[in-house]
Image: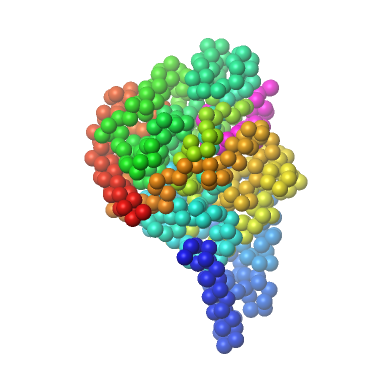
Amino acid sequence: MNFRRLLSCGLAVMLVLLTMAGCGSDNGAKQGNEERTVGGQEDGSGKLDPVTLKIMIPGDRPADMDKVLREAENRMADTLNVKLNVVFVPFSDLGQKTQMTLASGEEIDLIFDAPWLHVNQMISAGFYEPVEDLLKQYGPNIINSRPEEMWESNKFDGKIYGIPLGSSHAMGTTYLVRKDIREKLGVPPIQTYDDLIKFAYTVQEKEPNLVPFLPIGQDSQKYMSEASFRMHFDYDTRIQKTHALGSTIVLYYKNNDGKVYNLFEEMEPKVWDWILNARKLYNDKIIHPDVLAIKDTDEEFRSGKIAIHNTNDFGVKDKDKQAIAQNVPGGEVEAVTFFDMTPKKNISNFKQWNFLFVPAVSKHKERAIQFLNWTQEKENYDLLAYGIQGENWEPVGEDQYKMLNDKYTWFPYAWIWNPIHDRLNASDPEEVIELNKFLRKADHFEKDILTGFEFVSEPAANEIAKYNTIEAKYFTAIFNGVVDPDEYWTKFKEEAAPTLKIIQDELQKQIDAFLAKR
C-alpha cells in the first residue's frame, strides 16, 4: 500500500472515530489541546488555541519578513491561530548553530537540515521526530504536493523523518559570471570550463581590482569547493556523493554500478586532476586568497569584487542582479552552466538536498505539521515564497513570477518548497527556464540503481561523527587548492582512512543487501 493510499485510509478512520466520539459522549469536546488540534473548539468555529511556532532556517532575514509573517498570521487567525517566530541562521554557522540549539534542549518546532549538513548524525542522536503518522493525520496537502518518487526516495532509517524540499529531480549548478567584465574584455560567451578559466586569467591580467574566482570554502558546504563542484559536469565517470556522507566525495559512487569507492584506497585520476587544478588556480592567485575565511561568499560576490562565483541553481537570482547593478555602475551577471540536457545523460535517485524536520523536543508537533499543510495551498505558498502580491512580486501566467523589489528574497528551499506550486522566474532567459523545466520531469533521467535505497546510519554513527570531525580539517583546504595536495592528502589519509573504511564497508554491505532483494 503506497503512502497516498495510507493517507486516505488514515483520514477515513479518523473521521469515523471523531463521529463516534461526538455521538457517544460529550467528553470529546472537553479534551485538552491535543484533541482540539484536530477538531477545533467546541463552539464549532474551527479556531484552535493560540500557539507560537519557533522555526529555524538558513539564510538572511528579508526586509519585509515581518510584514509577510503578519499577513500569514492574519490568514490563520480564525483557524490554526498560529504565530510564527522564524529564526534565520547564516549558512556559515548553520551546522554548529542547529546542532548546539537542539543539544541544549531549546524548544524548536521546525528546523532545516540536509544530507550535506548533518542530517544522518542528528537522526542517529534522536533529535528528530518521525512524521509519517503526523502527515497521515494533518498533512494531506504536504503529501499531495510531492510525487510518490520523492517520498519513497527520501526516507531515513526506513522512516519519513523530514519533509523533502525541492522542485526538481537533479540539482541545477551554475557559475555566476560578471557579464559586463567579460564583454568589456572582449571575451566571447563562455561555453566550456576551459573558457571559464581562460576568462579568469584574463581578469587577473586586465582587471587587477577584481578577484577572478571565489568558490565556497566553508565546511558546511564542502561539496561546493572548487574541485568537488566539478563532479556536477562529469559525464564520463559520473561521480556522485554517497548516502553515508552526503557532502563529500572521498567516498563516492560512479557509473551507476552500485559500488562504493574510496579515494584513500585508490585515487580517482579525474578527481586528482581536479584537485591539482584547484591548487594551480590558488597558487596563481585566481582563487580568492581568503577562500576558507569568507563566511558569506554570496555577499562577497554581490559587492562587485569577484568575477566568478559558483552556486546551486540555474540562472541568476534577482538579489544577485540587483546587488551587482547597485554596487557597480553598469554591472551585470550571467549564469554559465555545463549541464547536458540530453535525456538519460544525467542520473537521478530522486533524492532531495533540503529537508524540514520536527524536532523531538517540540511541544507543538501536530500544529507544526498543520501549519506546513497550510503553506502547501497555492495562495499561501505564493505568500511565503514570494511575499506580498503587488508589493514584492506579481504573477506571470500560471507558473511564473516577477519580483518587484528586493525586500523579500526567494527562499522556499528552506521551509516550504514543492514542485507543484513553485513558480519559475519570468525574468530568467528562456534557456534557463527550459533547464528548470527539464529538471522537473523524472523521465529525463537515468534511474539510479540505488533509487529507494536508504542508509541506516546507526551501525556506523560513531565513525561518521569521527570522520566528519577529521575531514573538516582537510577537505575544503585541499579541494580549494589552499594547501599542498600531496602533503595534506597524506596527512588526511593517515588520520581518517581507518575510520572511513568502516563506513565504506557498512554502506556497501547495506547496498548489497538492498540490490539482492530487487
Q: Residue at x 48, y 47 (%)?
A: 350
> Horizontal and vertical percent for residue 103?
40, 54
Q: Residue at x 39, y 29 (%)?
A: 479
> Horizontal and vertical percent for residue 2?
48, 62
Seen from this angle, which residue lies furthest right? 390
Q: Nearer the viewer, residue 311 or 473?
A: 311
In the picture, the quarter occupied by the C terminus is bottom left
Is 45 drawn above or below residue 337 in the view shown?
below
Q: Residue at x 63, y 51 (%)?
A: 421
Residue 289 in magenta?
no
> Horizontal and vertical percent for residue 418?
58, 51
Number of dots carrying numbers = 0
Is 296 drawn above or below residue 4 in the view shown?
above
The answer to whether 316 appears left or right of 310 in the picture is right
Q: Quadrant of residue 96?
A: top left
Residue 319 in magenta?
yes
Is 138 drawn above or below residue 255 in the view shown?
below
> Horizontal and vertical percent for residue 43?
67, 78
The answer to whether 259 appears left or right of 119 in the picture is left
Q: Nearer the viewer, residue 384 or 254?
A: 254
Q: Quadrant of residue 14?
A: bottom right
Span of residues in magenta: 309-332
The answer to whether 277 appears left or right of 171 in the picture is left
Q: Nearer the viewer, residue 67 or 122?
A: 122
Q: Does residue 97 appear in this view?
A: no
How is this picture coloured?
rainbow
The answer to whether 506 appears left or right of 9 in the picture is left
Q: Does residue 284 appear in this view?
A: yes
Q: Residue at x 65, y 25 (%)?
A: 332
Q: Nearer the viewer, residue 122 or 93?
A: 122
Seen from this angle, which residue lies furthest bottom? 24
